[in-house]
Amino acid sequence: MSHKFTRLEHPWPAVLMHWAHLLAFFVLIGTGLQIHAHSGWFGPIGAVSQVHFVAMYVFILTTIVRIYWAFFGAGSAALGGLTRHRDWKFFGLDMADVKSTPSWIAYYLFLRREKPHAVKYGSLQKLTYAVLFPLGILIMALSGFAMFLPTAGAMTWFANIFGGLNGVRLMHYMTMWVLIVFFMIHFYLVVVEEPGQAAIMLFRTVPRSRRVVGDYPAEKATGTAGQKA
């Protein structure tokens, strides 16, 4: 059953940081593949390497700011809600999430028709957003600094864990593909499951038929105020 959405589910800071992550992610993929292939797809390899590292700094800084905002920012609302809560509360895994995980797996494998209940994110989403993505970003950042000449000396300890720079390059390359696969799954689920969420996350707009009373004060919205967390 479809439910209502509100713009407070994804406030402007979250939307802007989502765009920064998205654009930096694509730049990192494109420039990284050129660096790996030693080609000239997007220009001289030296210039492309600089763009790659600028995008990396944007991605890392955005991640740090996003984590800070999750704990100390104004917060966001639950699905269909109009009351803000600290954003980190929607990402924390608890026993209820552990118990609901089999139901979410069955739902995504088309073995269950009814979608499990979630205040905002399901257990698999929480695992991806709060654990897998940060872990992948950390590995990419550390391996990137280990291969970057000005910082390689300070990252020798990290290179030794993987048996040298060749191992670091392999880890960096494979982790990139893991993140790409997760992104593709994320994109598919958003578009297929809740396209209305994509409109909020990218453009902070809610389809008229899915709006909650009070979210757009200037117009007469339809539906109810939705549940609050």
Image (cartoon, rainbow, N blue to C red):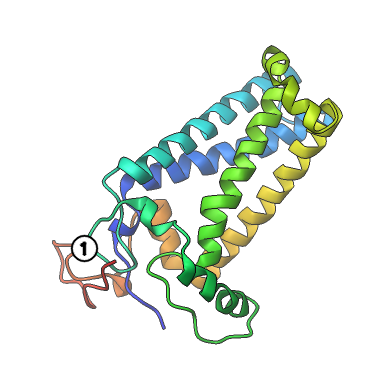
Residue 68, by quadrant, is top left
Q: Amino acid at mark 1?
A: Asp
Q: Is residue 42 left or right of residue 215?
A: right
Q: For residue 24, which quarter of the picture?
A: top right
Location of residue 125 in the rendering, given as x and y in whole percent from the top left corner? 52, 62
Residue at x-position 37% and y-position 69%: 119
Residue 46: x percent and y percent? 72, 17
Can residue 40 be seen from the camera position used here? no
Looking at this view, name the residue that lies furthest to the front.
95
Quadrant of the drawing holding the C terminus: bottom left
Q: Is residue 22 above or below residue 80?
A: above
Identify the residue position indicated by label 1 in the image.
215
Report whether 41 appears left or right of 130: right
Q: Residue at x 48, y 68 (%)?
A: 95
Rendered position, 209 above or below 161? below
118 to the left or right of 189: left
What x and y, as percent, mark residue 178?
71, 50
Q: How many residues crowd around disc 1 within 10 Å: few (fewer than 14), some, or many (20 or more)?
A: some
Tell which of 118 and 100 is nearer to you. Answer: 100
